[in-house]
Amino acid sequence: MDDIPGTEPQPRLVSRKAVLHAALAAGVAVPVALVGVPALARTAAATGTAPELTPMCDDGDDPTPPQTEGPYFKPNSPQRTSIIPAGATGIRLTVTGYVFGLSCLPLSNVLMDFWQADANGAYDNTTYRFRGHQFTNAQGAFTLTTIFPGLYPGRTRHIHVKVQASGRPVLTTQLYFPNEPRNNTDPIFDSRLLMTVRDVSGAKQASFDFVLNVPQVPPTSTTKPTSTTPTTTTTTPPGSGTWAAGTTYAAGARVTYGGRGYVCLQGHTAQPGWEPPNTPALWRAE
Ligand code: FE
């Protein structure tokens, strides 16, 4: 079912990852309702329209494919979310997204090391211009502030990145831009690595979600998932009760829904459509 490298992506089923992305993004930015959920998932890449949010999830998300590192990686980049050096020119570009594991749970504290060419297609191999690393936050999200990378001979437009969950192998790959003429001739290009890109007020906003080859444990395992870091430590989880939209739940809260028990993985205010069976990023069945 994978898209054929070198071609534009075919429409996909809305994946669990896409649903989670929309829910997570809404949980941060849109606390009212699911209506108008930002269309940030990569499934929107082909048409620019929002994926239809649905409680049906499939587990067909393959791990993000690796790509060649290329000749220009430099270790020991500075930690920063903006890699734009002072005085640099270029179209401003923001890349946002989430990093998930194999069970579609977001991964926090994942190391992401970005590097790219400047607006003229040149890499800085002397200092660290357009290079920097950061870590995903407690919700598994990242934001990179940079510029639209320039082209250089033999390649289509791209951004390099290394992604590593704690104690796991490094994923080295590249991100691509839709509607680039050279996407059809660059032998390294892979449409599975296309970002969703929008033009907003002279700048570009891109989105991409990574799936790492990180097993995520079932509830009965003694190993703790990496994504359950509480965002608050002073909130007392509500006691047992029936799940209800509009209720604010803290990590660790336990509810019943449909006769089954669930434990809250991330603090949030419940909304219609976020019932525990539909939101594995928020609720784990007990
Ligand atoms: Fe490159």
Image: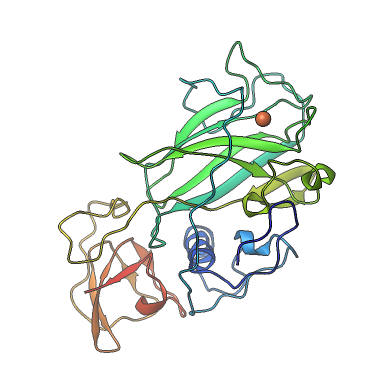
Q: Nearer the viewer, residue 160 or 129?
A: 160
Residue 169 sits above or below residue 85 on the image: below
Q: Quadrant of the C terminus?
A: bottom left
Q: Position of residue 251 (x, y in %)?
A: 27, 61
Is residue 128 found left or right of 63 in the rendered image? right
Is residue 258 found left or right of 114 in the rendered image? left
Is residue 236 found left or right of 171 in the rendered image? left
Say how many tags the image has. 0
Residue 190 sits above or below residue 8 on the image: above
The part of the image, by quadrant, that contains residue 149 is top right
Q: Position of residue 67 (x, y in %)?
A: 58, 40
Q: Residue furthest left?
A: 222
Q: Residue furthest right?
A: 181
Q: Residue furthest top?
A: 126
Q: Tell me, yes or no, if residue 275 can be seen here.
A: no
Residue 252 sits above or below residue 272 on the image: above
Q: How is the image coloured?
A: rainbow
Q: Tell me, yes or no, if residue 64 can be seen here.
A: yes
Q: Nearer the viewer, residue 186 or 134?
A: 186
Q: Position of residue 278 (x, y in %)?
A: 41, 77
Q: Quadrant of the N terminus?
A: bottom right
Residue 150 sits above or below residue 186 on the image: above
Q: Position of residue 157 (x, y in %)?
A: 74, 38
Is residue 210 found left or right of 244 in the rendered image? right
Quarter of the displayed picture in which ligand 1 can be seen:
top right
The part of the image, by quadrant, that contains residue 126 is top right
Q: Nearer the viewer, residue 171 or 97?
A: 171
Q: Residue at x 56, y 75 (%)?
A: 53
